[in-house]
Image (cartoon, rainbow, N blue to C red):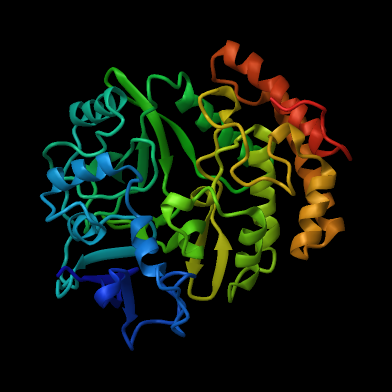
Amino acid sequence: MIELDAYLEGVYYGRFAEGGHTGELVFTYDESAPATPISLSIPRDGRASRSAATNLLDNLLPDRAEVRERMKKSYGAAGADTLSLLAAAGGDIAGGLVLVPAGADLRRDQPLLDPALDMDVAERIAAIKRDPDAWTPAEGPARFSLAGSQGKFALADYEGEWYWSNRTMPSTHIIKPAAMRLPGLEQVEADTLALASTVGLPAAKASLLHMLDQQAFIVERFDRAPTGTVAAQRIHAEDLAQASGTSAKRKYDQTAKQTIELLRAAELADPDIEYDFLRQLAFNTIIGNADAHAKNYSVMLRPDRISLAPLYDAVPVILYPEYDQNLAMEISGARRPSAVSLDHWRKLARSTGLDIGRVEHEIRTLAAAMNGAIEDAWPSIDPIQRNELLPLVKRNLLAAISDTATPRAR
């Protein structure tokens, strides 16, 4: 039976193991572990739900079973189950965690540098564009696990050179080649995060990576920090599905109301954390990002505070009809971005106990900032796409500050 030891930011925290006849995983804190919880869903007082540990780890892996089977073969894992995959790939995962087979000693680890040659990185990009399930190469030194449904891989930057990530060499960047069926997605996402930063939202830093004849979206990890040495520092973070103990299969079920209540209840949470989430939620709604589910928001877990992570995975999927255009987190019954009015935000405030006046102020302030930046937004995308996108976002902006929504929703 596989058991995994968990190290959080280099400190031993405890062990994941199967919980007897239930088949669910359990996590047992080491008595000497610091006070910061490994997850909001697994508090130190033992109040974790039966599935919390299972869902925490499962949310560290790709969504699709096909990708997990590829990981098993690439990494030589014993199986495609959660513990087996993370025993092989848990050395470089989201947040501050390192997961290793029980009994492994990390204290003497030195950074293992495996250069990522331009031709190999270009081939990784091309392979994922050809086959979105090809997250991991058939062979090679990389050892990482990334969550989600879109093909991606991780790299570590050291002094301007790229290296494959592993347990001793934390990745610093995530590369997401866009599927052929989603034209322009890479530049659209990079420009969207730039817009978020322009209007005052903390956002992940993104751009396009050009490697030989290939290009892909690249984003700096907000859960890593430079140390002045070879290896970056892992910073603990978790997405809001993990924080609530929700399965990745149910990431679309978590509501805005549930999320606000979760953040409010967190010990040591920033006093404005609910309003920080509200601003990110409103931004995603206005740009037409109906796909912003619980795994597209995260919290940073520090010893003395819990804060909302910078915005990431922000894409106006309104440009891509193959996406479901109903909001992953509907706003007080409004299902389409263009149907969300100021009154819907007021209703959300009332239902969650937020200050109605402040919520209205936050929405108006964000909308004003976006209105002032909209004519210069998405400067690098295809002009045809931009000409389609801008009127849709302007329509959503108008709805957001109106007492009633526009009559039609796309």
Position of residue 279 measured from the top left corner of the image (x, y, whole percent): 69, 49
The residue lying at 13 percent from left, 44 percent from top is 73
Direction from residue 215 to residue 352 in the image, left or right = right
Can residue 96 be spotted in the picture?
no
From the viewer's side, name the closer residue of 44 and 205: 44
The N terminus - image quarter: bottom left
Position of residue 182 measured from the top left corner of the image (x, y, whole percent): 45, 22
Direction from residue 300 to residue 368 in the image, left or right = right
- When asked about the image quadrant of residue 355, the answer is bottom right
Direction from residue 370 to residue 303 in the image, left or right = left
Q: Is residue 232 above or below residue 45?
A: above
From the viewer's side, name the closer residue of 208 and 178: 178
Direction from residue 135 to residue 197 in the image, left or right = right
- When asked about the image quadrant of residue 364, the answer is top right
Position of residue 331 measured from the top left corner of the image (x, y, whole percent): 71, 47
From the viewer's side, name the closer residue of 131 and 326: 326
Q: State the residue lying farthest toward the top.
A: 384
Position of residue 257 measured from the top left corner of the image (x, y, whole percent): 67, 58
